[in-house]
Amino acid sequence: MSKNYETVIGLEVHVELATKTKIFCSCSTEFGGAPNTHTCPVCTGMPGALPVLNKKVVEYAMAVGLATNCKITQYSKFDRKNYFYPDNPQNYQISQLYLPICRDGYVEIETPAGKKNIRIHEIHMEEDAGKLVHDEWEDVSIVDYNRSGVPLIEIVSEPDMRSADEVIAYLETLRQTIQYLGASDCKLNEGSMRADVNLSVREMGSPKFGTRTEMKNLNSFKAIAHAIEGERDRQIELLEMGRKVIQETRRWDDNKESSHAMRSKEDAQDYRYFPDPDLTPLVISDEWIEKIRAAQPELRPQKLERYKREYDIPEYDAKIITESKRMADLFEAVTAICGKPKKVSNWLMGETMRLLKEEGKDADDISFAPVHLASLIDLVDAGTINSSVAKEVFEEIFKNDVDPEKYVEEHGLKAVNDEGALRETIAQIIAENPKSVADYKSGKKKAMGFIVGQTMKAMKGKANPGMVNQIVKELMDQQ
């Protein structure tokens, strides 16, 4: 009989920080430059080149630590982690093992069973390695050192997660928090947020952890969820067959939906860590911590509460809007201009979300000016354009950031509010459709909808719908 197993998961999340320059030199961190153009003697590991710590990296690390309820280590050091890879120019990585900058924090996640705290063991600062580009045609690998020395924080959780859903909730909470802080854009597709999954299984109720494996190469939430399910099933299958799980690092292939072993899992002693002799210990004063704490922006949980209180919008709307800092900033900016929070929320939740989905974009890609959406909302409220024209104009705002007032004027889209002209058109349509009049008289109220539709068609969709409905009803009642 098959046993019941529990999955135990801990994560190592690497986040590239949003500094303009690298952690130990002044080279640019910009994504996508020509290979090996953002480099210097320091980040390419030239003999005698000395690292100088970027203060902004420390401040971002502290900000993330404070936002995740960590204690800040006021005396911390950098260590050398020795390993030999072609994309690692010094043959060591400057990291923090013994005295990481943040420890003992937690983030709160929502689960079907209620709120749960996922503990954070530590957050440490380190430098990224370069990037190997494999040319299968030439059968060679070439190295791009642009990413070498880009500042990272590594957020190491305790093994507190029990399912893929909990992992995704934890990662989404981390991503939102870090984006709200402005510490990173956390774009998984560009590698600025990467997660390694440490996973083991054990019999339900057992106090002892099973043997864990680490999975790398996970660059989307979908891949992470699939990898967790796949590795869980693989380990259970091994145990059911009476075989042992081997501690190793595995690489997940999202196309094949399977993983394969890369190497046996290293322990700290395999890296021969020792304090970096070129960097002095980092001493953080109480005043510096308080300065960072005072500068912390409003994070999502506080924003959510304020929206419900201040803007009187439904909780569902507030939750969706605050999921993305870009969307929340846009909501506040448009509302500040037009003072109509519910209408702003409707446009963001409806047409904006629809167009983002259609174009395969996310909220960070929104580029229209808040004043243009505010102006569109005012045009609809004033009856200058009707709602169907407004949707057409909004598409132009979304795609090309047009000024709606100018666009409506130039394309002759103003609503027809001329009652005389409308009466004339409606009277003619009624005269041409005696069957609809007869149906209406016999109690079929839908017949009125046909006349309204024909009127809107005749007016090329520009008539004021409220006025059309009112006149159609009045004239049909007179028949």
Image: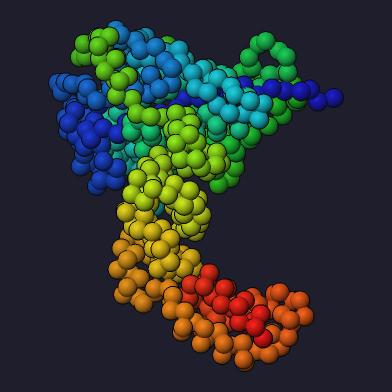
Most foreground residue, 376 or 47: 376
Judge whether residue 190 can be spotted in this image.
Answer: no
Where is residue 79 shown, x and y percent of the image? 31, 14
Residue 229 in the image: state x and y as whole percent.
Answer: 64, 34
Up-down: is 395 above or below 148? Answer: below
In the image, residue 247 sits, relative to residue 473, either above or below, namely: above
359 lies above or below 92: below
Name of the residue lying farthest toward the right: 1
Q: Is there any visible trace of residue 229 in the rendered image?
A: yes
Considering depth in this image, is 440 or 228 the residue closer to the camera? Answer: 440
* Foreground pick, 336 / 48: 336
Quarter of the image where the N terminus is located: top right
230 sits left or right of 77 in the view: right
Quadrant of residue 223 within the rendered picture = top right
The location of residue 99, given as percent across then percent down, is: 35, 9
Residue at position x 67%, y 10% in the image:
207
> Could you tell me how many numbered marks the image carries?
0
Residue 210 percent across, percent down from the top left:
64, 17
